[in-house]
Image (tube, rainbow, N blue to C red):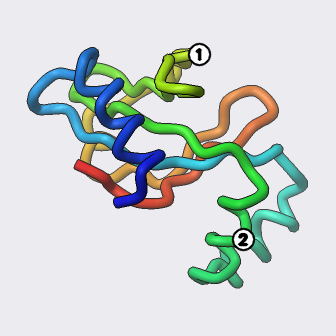
Amino acid sequence: MDIKTKEALDVIEKIKSPDDIIYEVFRSEKRSGWFHFWDTVFDVIPSTTTKLLNDKVMYLIASEKSGKIIEIENRTITNITEIPGWLSDKKENFKKVVIDNYIYKKYKKIS
């Protein structure tokens, strides 16, 4: 685990419940349906890694009742976004969610 992720987890541990799952997610701008079709077809590890370098990395706290996307900068929570329409099965099976003009995609499950 890299230092930035470890620092973020230290901050998140203060607000999460013991049974919550933490995901590392990245945010990219919403694009056309064809773009997302081809993105899904050609989604491989190198392209995901490249996207992480260019897009904003955030963290998702997934529980039975809600999903919250946490933005952290300099060991401080700068924004918390509640995911609308959260279902309890997303806690274990989160892949991606669209909120406003952004797509939040799972990169990896941390804990």
Asked if residue 71 shows in the view, the reply is: no
In the image, 90 versus 71, the foreground residue is 71
Q: Who comes first in sequence, dot 1 or dot 2? A: 2
Quarter of the rendering containing residue 51:
bottom right
Q: Residue at x 41, y 35 (%)?
A: 8
In this view of the protein, which residue sits in the foreground, 22 or 78? Answer: 78
**Residue 68 shown left or right of residue 40 in the figure:** left
Left-right relation of 99 to 71: right
Q: Around disc 1, counting alpha carbons within 10 Å, would you say few (fewer than 14), some (14 to 19), or many (20 or more)? A: few
Q: Give the quarter of the image for residue 42.
A: bottom right
Q: Relative to residue 46, is residue 89 depicted above or below?
A: above
The quarter of the image holding the N terminus is bottom left
Instruction: Inspect the image, locate mark 1, and give the three-letter code of the amino acid beneath it.
Output: Thr
Instruction: Please name the residue that numbered disc 2 is placed on.
Output: 50
Badge 1 is on which residue? 78
Q: Secondary structure at mark 2?
A: helix
* Residue at image point 71% right, 60% down: 53
The amino acid pointed to by label 2 is: Thr
Question: Circle 1 — which element?
Answer: strand
What is the distance, in whole Å, between disc 1 and disc 2 at their CAs? Answer: 24 Å
**Residue 108: percent from the left, percent from the top?**
41, 60
Where in the figure is residue 87, as x and y percent of width and height? 34, 32
Compared across the picture, whether 108 is left or right of 92 comes to right
